Image (cartoon, rainbow, N blue to C red):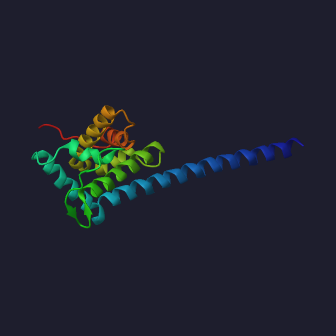
Amino acid sequence: MTAVLAAVLGATLGAIGALVVSRANSRRSERVTMTSALIAEYFSTEFLHHRISIGNTSEKVRNGELSFEEIATGYWYPGAHDTFTGDDFNGLNEHQHIEAYIGFIVRIDYLLDAGRVYATELRGALGMKLMWEDFLLTGLASACLEQTRRANVQPPDWTRSISRVHDEITIAPRAL
């Protein structure tokens, strides 16, 4: 009876060990896939349109044609009724391009929270690139937080995502 008990115990422990290893390999594979998918999306032709539009909007802010406060009213509830839409570019207006880009950042944040991507690989592949859009996104998030504070309403969750991706993924330029 002892030999049978030992065999059952050994088989059970072996099965549990195999399950643990299988799950770890599956999670590792998923992280590689999700990380690669985000990187590919960022460098895709479709996403390039969002990046170009955000670059154009950033230039308007830098040149004083537009302020973060004017843009921010359209990114929190209730915000303003006459919100900034901007110029059309490749079938979307500037507001819509910013919205799509914010969605991308929110996905990065969600996948980081869920442990479904490799932050180090994202930082290596996207960190220097994200800094180009970081000016607009962090300024917009800051303006939204200030506007919602003044209105005494809940700030949008995406502002936290912008902050986290800025802190954990974006590589800020260094002075030479």
Q: Quadrant of residue 56?
A: bottom left
Name the quadrant of the N terminus. Answer: top right
Q: Please name the residue shown 35% across and 44% down the image.
A: 78
Q: How many marks?
A: 0
Q: Please name the residue shown 40% across and 45% down the image.
A: 109
Question: Residue 103, percent across and down?
Answer: 36, 52
The residue furthest right is 1
Q: Please name the residue shown 38% across and 48% down the image.
A: 106
Q: Quadrant of residue 113?
A: top left
Q: Please name the residue shown 70% across and 50% down the image.
A: 15
Question: Residue 150, percent across and down?
Answer: 30, 32
Name the quadrant of the C terminus. Answer: top left
Q: Quadrant of residue 36?
A: bottom left
Question: Residue 3, percent across and down?
Answer: 85, 44
Q: Nearer the viewer, residue 14 or 139?
A: 139
Q: Nearer the viewer, residue 128 or 48?
A: 48
Q: Is residue 149 above or below residue 52?
A: above
The residue furthest left is 63
Question: Residue 14, percent across and down?
Answer: 70, 48
Q: Is residue 53 left or right of residue 14?
A: left
